[in-house]
Image (cartoon, coloured by chain):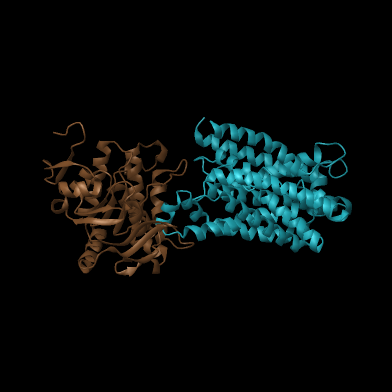
Chain colours: A cyan, B brown
Amino acid sequence: MSAMTKNLLSKTLVLATALTLVYFTLFIGDDIANNLQDIWQLISGEADKYQSIVVWQWRASRLFSAIIIGAALAISGAVFQSLVRNPLGSPDITGFNVGAFTGVLIAIALFGNIYWYSVVGAIIGGLCAAILVYLFAYRDGHSGFRLIIVGIAISATLTAFNQWLSLTVSLETAMTAALWSAGSLNGMTWLRIMPATLLIVALMGLALLLNTRMKLLEMGDDTAAALGISVNKTRLIIMLIGVSLTAVATAITGPISFISLAAPQIARRLHPQKHITLVGSALVGALLLMSADFIAQHSMQNATLPVGLVTISLGGLYLVYLIIREGK
Amino acid sequence: MTQQSSQLSAVNTAETKQAALSTQSVTLAYEQNVIAKDLSVDIPHGKFTVIVGPNGCGKSTLLRALSRLLVPQSGEILLNGENIHHQSTREVAKKLGLLPQSAIAPDGIKVIDLVSRGRFPHQKWFQPWSEADQNAVELAMQATGVIDYAELNVDQLSGGQRQRVWVAMALAQETSLLLLDEPTTYLDIAHQIELMDLFQDLNQIQGHTLVAVLHDLNHACRYADHLIMIKSGQVIATGAPNEIVTEEIIQQVFGLSCLILADPVSNTPLIIPRGRKTAN
């Protein structure tokens, strides 16, 4: 099979999976839609109120959230893997998402559960985690590998800190924290996802704008500087964008692992020249989180799992594979 | 290519009196670790300048400073008479190219794509790839003889070919000045000579001002118009190899006892180390 047909085939397969997922996520269930006519009525707005609300208010907003959050996490992962020049250098390994969640918890404990406070808290928390990792990993410059090891340590510390925080705050806050600590799309509404979407889309635009510079930085600091890039300034801005993407996503859903780590790497394998592109990563990330959330909603008879639980289980396996392969 | 070289030669005749690049009593240091104090060197226009010296003498540090990657703690670096750190790094990138030692080729990148990255300083936000960009990339690949591999992956090439691709990327930048940090390291002798010949062509035919840090003294003597010999962060001798390379100066700079003959091919100094075993 030629490389081109193989490429076309894999793209068709991915698209078909995505469409099937969208279809089932929206229309599954006897009391929602039994046949094409029911679905047409839902789409054209002629279905009755209950079904419309279930599909367009509850399910569609949740599906949309999975897509946008998945894309945000994936781009954040692609950005950091590029900066650290290592496939393990992703924000869910180095604990930036756990840091963001610490920020959310502190914001909730101090000000109550207010939307923008959580978002800002998440960004500050994520940045603090990033600064901690960079400071502790600094020794005559940064090696990608040391950043990752230090990141894993910071991540573990912050997870413990988050648990301690949950134990000391009020019961209400602790309940909210528990709800989110695994990362979940439960109870997502359009009202909740839309403001974050605006921010995420803006950040994605910035990331795309800086994409060329990111690629030049991958060739080494000296090479990038020789081509006229202010290396430290550019790296700082790109890092801010990457942390913010993870942080905003975390503020909405809690820490969801694995998407940032895996999406860019899967996108690379699907790319004909084996490149990591931001758009490719975003598409794969969206598809991954969509699939994971579908599993989370439908794998248990009477319960909905937090989607973070699904991604972390899949991610654990993938991480083991990656470490074995890197170690060779 | 003719248009480019005529432009460059016009620049050269206009500014021959002034050094293309110079350091004015700079102090170079990595944090507390001072490498050079009160160091002044001139890089003459249109020449092939080679910097040599023992390991750790500060020659690579000097090259980093000349290419604005290292900010001097005191003193100034002048590019065409202007302080290099008062110009935007992107403006400098249009005048001065660098082939660093540490360049990393991204996985699976094609030769033409890597060379195209050299156009970055000439491109603006949202500006599409222009004909000028295309021409510069093609000329650079022709000059370095990598045009036949344009569509191949960089990882598929041999060490010598790969190094020529990096040179092509720097050439696509269309700078009159080109700085090379130990460009022949890790290459076998045939590829070293091939690359040095390429640099000579770039200098003599295309009119680039070249500065290279080299380890091989005999290559330095054969190819350099202008030699800068450094020891412990200080310039010991500077000038044409035929004028400055003597047994005494090699002893002084490298602590090496040697014999100097005229290279039968190029009539430049040829350094024959005495070593221990052959001492008379």
Residue B221, horizontal then vertical, whole percent: 19, 47
Residue A263, horizontal then vertical, whole percent: 62, 43
- Image quadrant containing the N terminus of chain B: bottom left
The relative height of residue B60 versus residue B110 in the rendered view (above or below) is below
Residue A13, horizontal then vertical, whole percent: 63, 37
Would you say B60 lies left or right of A41 here?
left
A225 or B136, which lies in front? A225
**Residue drawn at point x = 80 percent, y = 59 percent:** A109
A291 or B252, which lies in front? B252
Would you say B8 lies left or right of A58 here?
left
Would you say A118 lies left or right of A47 here?
left
Residue B187 in sight here: yes
The relative height of residue A263 versus residue A196 in the rendered view (above or below) is above
Residue B39 lies in what quarter of the image? bottom left
**Residue drawn at point x = 46 percent, y = 44 percent:** B106
Residue B205 in sight here: no
B81 or B269, which lies in front? B269
Residue A280, horizontal then vertical, whole percent: 58, 46
Query: So how many labels did they put on this image?
Result: 0
Would you say B216 lies left or right of A36 here?
left
- Image quadrant containing the C terminus of chain B: top left
Residue A248 lies in what quarter of the image? bottom right
